[in-house]
Image (cartoon, rainbow, N blue to C red):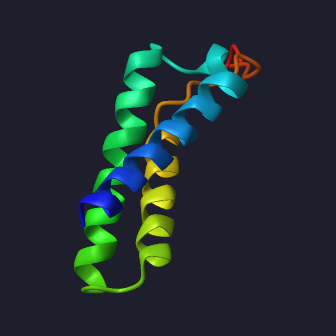
Amino acid sequence: MILEALGSAVLGIVLAWAAVQRLSHRLPATRLVFATGIAGALFGDFVTHSALDSGSLLVSLLGAVVVSAASVSLLLRPSGRLRHSATA
Protein backbone atom coordinates (compact mmCIF):
# COMPACT_ATOMS: atom_id res chain seq x y z
CA MET A 1 0.00 0.00 0.00
CA ILE A 2 2.79 2.42 0.84
CA LEU A 3 4.65 1.60 -2.37
CA GLU A 4 1.43 2.09 -4.31
CA ALA A 5 0.94 5.54 -2.77
CA LEU A 6 4.58 6.42 -3.39
CA GLY A 7 4.30 5.29 -7.00
CA SER A 8 1.18 7.34 -7.58
CA ALA A 9 2.83 10.40 -6.02
CA VAL A 10 5.80 9.98 -8.34
CA LEU A 11 3.43 9.71 -11.31
CA GLY A 12 1.72 12.91 -10.15
CA ILE A 13 5.08 14.70 -9.99
CA VAL A 14 6.02 13.48 -13.47
CA LEU A 15 2.66 14.56 -14.89
CA ALA A 16 2.89 17.98 -13.24
CA TRP A 17 6.46 18.43 -14.48
CA ALA A 18 5.39 17.60 -18.04
CA ALA A 19 2.52 20.08 -17.81
CA VAL A 20 4.82 22.82 -16.50
CA GLN A 21 7.32 22.16 -19.29
CA ARG A 22 4.71 22.25 -22.07
CA LEU A 23 2.16 24.75 -20.76
CA SER A 24 3.95 27.01 -18.29
CA HIS A 25 2.50 30.15 -19.90
CA ARG A 26 -1.05 28.91 -19.23
CA LEU A 27 -0.58 27.60 -15.68
CA PRO A 28 -0.42 29.37 -12.31
CA ALA A 29 2.55 29.06 -9.94
CA THR A 30 4.68 25.96 -10.33
CA ARG A 31 4.27 24.95 -6.69
CA LEU A 32 0.50 24.90 -7.10
CA VAL A 33 0.74 22.72 -10.20
CA PHE A 34 3.01 20.21 -8.46
CA ALA A 35 0.81 20.14 -5.35
CA THR A 36 -2.29 19.62 -7.47
CA GLY A 37 -0.62 16.85 -9.47
CA ILE A 38 0.47 14.97 -6.36
CA ALA A 39 -2.84 15.44 -4.53
CA GLY A 40 -4.81 14.38 -7.61
CA ALA A 41 -2.70 11.27 -8.04
CA LEU A 42 -3.03 10.26 -4.40
CA PHE A 43 -6.77 10.86 -4.47
CA GLY A 44 -7.14 8.92 -7.73
CA ASP A 45 -5.17 6.03 -6.28
CA PHE A 46 -7.31 6.08 -3.14
CA VAL A 47 -10.58 6.10 -5.08
CA THR A 48 -9.47 3.38 -7.49
CA HIS A 49 -8.08 1.22 -4.71
CA SER A 50 -11.28 1.66 -2.67
CA ALA A 51 -13.58 0.92 -5.60
CA LEU A 52 -11.71 -2.17 -6.77
CA ASP A 53 -10.74 -3.35 -3.30
CA SER A 54 -7.29 -4.86 -3.69
CA GLY A 55 -7.21 -4.85 -7.48
CA SER A 56 -4.07 -4.81 -9.54
CA LEU A 57 -1.38 -2.22 -9.03
CA LEU A 58 -1.51 -1.17 -12.67
CA VAL A 59 -5.21 -0.30 -12.51
CA SER A 60 -4.72 1.76 -9.34
CA LEU A 61 -1.85 3.68 -10.93
CA LEU A 62 -3.93 4.25 -14.05
CA GLY A 63 -6.68 5.75 -11.89
CA ALA A 64 -4.08 7.94 -10.21
CA VAL A 65 -2.84 9.25 -13.56
CA VAL A 66 -6.36 9.96 -14.82
CA VAL A 67 -7.43 11.93 -11.75
CA SER A 68 -4.09 13.76 -11.59
CA ALA A 69 -4.35 14.80 -15.24
CA ALA A 70 -7.92 15.97 -14.72
CA SER A 71 -6.90 17.98 -11.64
CA VAL A 72 -3.99 19.67 -13.38
CA SER A 73 -6.13 20.43 -16.43
CA LEU A 74 -8.51 22.41 -14.20
CA LEU A 75 -5.67 24.87 -13.55
CA LEU A 76 -5.26 25.80 -17.22
CA ARG A 77 -6.09 29.35 -18.22
CA PRO A 78 -7.34 30.37 -21.68
CA SER A 79 -4.56 30.87 -24.20
CA GLY A 80 -5.55 34.49 -24.89
CA ARG A 81 -6.76 33.85 -28.42
CA LEU A 82 -10.41 34.21 -27.46
CA ARG A 83 -12.04 37.42 -28.62
CA HIS A 84 -15.19 38.84 -27.18
CA SER A 85 -17.50 40.66 -29.53
CA ALA A 86 -18.43 44.24 -28.77
CA THR A 87 -22.14 43.45 -29.07
CA ALA A 88 -22.18 40.86 -26.32
Q: Position of residue 84 (x, y in %)?
A: 68, 19
- Pick whichever, 54 or 50, lies toward us: 54
31 to the left or right of 21: left
Asked whether 5 or 44 is in front, the reply is 5
Q: Position of residue 28 (x, y in %)?
A: 48, 16
| Residue drawn at x 37%, y 40% as measured from the top left | 38
Q: Residue at x 34, y 63 (%)?
A: 4
Q: Quadrant of the N terminus?
A: bottom left
Q: Residue at x 34, y 51 (%)?
A: 6
Q: Which residue shows up at 42% across the image and 83% down it?
A: 56
The answer to which image quadrant residue 33 occupies is top left
Residue 22 at x, y = what percent? Answer: 72, 27
Q: How many marks?
A: 0
Q: Quadrant of the C terminus?
A: top right
Residue 5 drawn at (x, y percent): 30, 56
Nearer the observer, 83 or 64:
64
Quadrant housing residue 43? bottom left
Q: Nearer the viewer, residue 22 or 60?
A: 60
On screen, 67 above or below 59? Answer: above
In the drawing, does residue 64 fall left or right of residue 50?
right
Q: Residue furthest right?
A: 81
